[in-house]
Amino acid sequence: MASVWQTMQDFYAWALENGDSRTDPWLLVYSPAPVILIFSVYLVLVALGPRLMGSREPFTLHYVLLIYNVALVGLSVYMFYEFLVTSVLAGYSYLCQPVDYSESELGMRMARVCWWFYFSKVIELLDTIFFIMRKKFNQISFLHVYHHATMIFNWWAGVKYVAGGQAFFIGMLNSFVHIFMYLYYALAVLGPSMQKYLWWKRYLTLLQLVNKRSRPCVHVEPNVAQDEHVVPWWLSVGDMGDLVADVGISVTDFAFLFLQTQFGAIALHSGYNLVTDCPFPDGFNTAVFAYIITLIILFLNFYYQTYLRRTQRKKM
């Protein structure tokens, strides 16, 4: 037992000291301990929050949500610009891009925006807190919690060891979609008076469907009251319960679109680099590939539980 403990200590020390020396001094990077603490507090709030809010009236958070969404719009604009401009100036490849570990201007610029993207995932844990405060408990699914928790650990490891490289494309695409997503949320918070300016919401949803970070979407039954709509968590910050129905695609169509364009593309991309001589660490490509498999499994379970099983019950 002592040898096992010593081995774990040695590995932990090795992991701390063999990160990217450029990013180690940055906030929440050198050690996983702060991230583990944040994650632990997050889980405690997820577990106890609904109980604490049980007898209380839900918070409206009107102005808080407005400020939150506007701030994330600004952050997303900055990150997308930095990912795009830096990758173009540095001549990045969209198929296989090694990490530039140098302290050159462009190398450091890419590392910095990767850190901001990682930090944005920490900020987005507030999505869950807002659900709890507003008593939107049905949105706090296992998939929701799993996604938020794994993203902060995934991007901690990314910034700690591979701040740049081919992962830039995921960050760039996600940041681009979040510009419009959080802009819509901010406008939706302003109420019915803004509805005439939200004609583009169906295009936002379609954009989200082909973005890596999009999450499973289910059909919204037209005869169900709006508050009972089964809406994916990533559409709920701005109370967009009718947004999915506006797109006019069936769950089956979306399931194929979702799996083929998102999971399939990412799995193929990481799998391709596992069988080629791409000078991007195989360990991270393997981790991405394995992570996508878990999301596929969770998505299929979500799809079955929220749509297929419900359809079967209605036929009985």
Image (cartoon, rainbow, N blue to C red):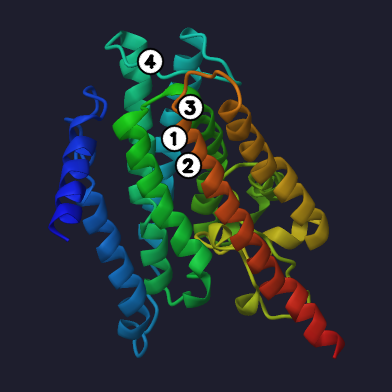
Distance between mark 1 and mark 3 Cα atoms: 17 Å
Query: Considering depth in this image, is 132 or 226 the residue closer to the camera?
Result: 132
What amino acid is at disc 2?
Answer: Ala
Q: Which mark is residue 100?
A: 4
Between label 3 and label 4, give the one nearer the viewer.
Answer: 4
Q: Are marks 2 and 4 in contact (CB under 8 Å)?
A: no
| Residue corresponding to mark 2 | 287
Q: Are marks 1 and 2 in contact (CB under 8 Å)?
A: yes
Res 37 → quadrant = bottom left
Query: Does label 1 or label 3 sit earlier along the sequence?
Result: 3
Element at badge 1? helix
Query: Considering depth in this image, is 137 or 147 the residue closer to the camera?
Result: 147
Distance between mark 4 and mark 1 Cα atoms: 17 Å
Distance between mark 3 and mark 2 Cα atoms: 16 Å
Label 2, residues with CA under 10 Å away: few <14, some 14-19, many ≥20: few
Q: Quadrant of the C terminus?
A: bottom right
Where is residue 305? Give x, y as percent.
67, 74
Query: Does label 3 or label 2 sit earlier along the sequence?
Result: 3
| Residue corresponding to mark 1 | 283
Where is residue 167? Give x, y as percent.
48, 30
- From the viewer's perspective, tell me whether residue 161 is left or right of residue 92: left
Element at badge 3? helix
Rendered position, 197 above or below 195: above
Between label 4 and label 1, give the one nearer the viewer.
Answer: 1
Query: Does label 2 or label 4 sit earlier along the sequence?
Result: 4
Element at badge 4? loop
What amino acid is at disc 3?
Answer: Phe
Q: Which mark is residue 168?
A: 3
